[in-house]
Amino acid sequence: MRMIRFTALWCPSCLFMRPRWDKVFAAYPDVPILTYDFDECPEEVAHWKIGPILPVLILEEDGKEITRLTGEKSIKELTRWAEGWLR
């Protein structure tokens, strides 16, 4: 299982979420996290069908999407999501 993050340098929500992600996902050091820039990785954006709303977190296993989280979330929401899927 791994997490894929889609962000963009021009995206205020992406910049806002980065410290929240770092705080919540530090509790899961065994889960690899790949980060793709929306503008620099068009093949990945197309493959995962990333729409106009960023940021996007995808939890995938064996190349298949398990779940996805889109947009700004509170630390509480991120923690609940992580606990539900990563434990």
Image (cartoon, rainbow, N blue to C red):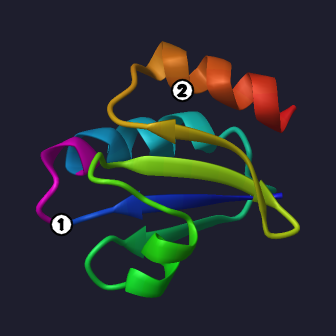
- Check the picture and name the quadrant holding the N terminus: bottom right
Tell me: residue 61, above or below residue 34.
above
Q: Where is residue 64 in the image (x, y as percent from the top left)?
A: 79, 61
Q: Where is residue 56 in the image (x, y as percent from the top left)?
A: 44, 49
Q: Name the residue under label 1.
A: 9
Q: Is mark 1 on a helix, strand or loop?
A: loop
Number of numbered markers: 2
**Which mark is first along the chain, 2 or 1?**
1
Mark 1–mark 2 Cα distance, whole angstroms, equals 21 Å
Tell me: residue 77, above or below residue 65.
above
Q: Mark 2 points at which residue?
A: 78
Q: Where is residue 10 in the image (x, y as percent from the top left)?
A: 11, 62
Q: Is mark 2 on a helix, strand or loop?
A: helix
Task: Magenta stretch: give its range.
Answer: 9-14
Q: Residues within 10 Å of mark 2 (few under 14, many from 20)?
A: some
Query: Which residue is depicted at the point 47% across and 85% down?
Result: 43
Label 2 sits on what residue type? Leu
Q: How crowded is mark 1: few (under 14 residues within 10 Å), some or many (20 or more)?
A: few
Looking at the image, residue 18 sits to the left or right of residue 87; the answer is left
Q: Is residue 85 magenta?
A: no
Looking at the image, residue 40 sits to the left or right of residue 34; the answer is left
Query: Which residue is depicted at the point 60% across and 23% down?
Result: 79
Label 1 sits on what residue type? Leu
Q: Which mark is residue 53?
A: none
Query: Which residue is depicted at the point 52% across and 37% down?
Result: 69
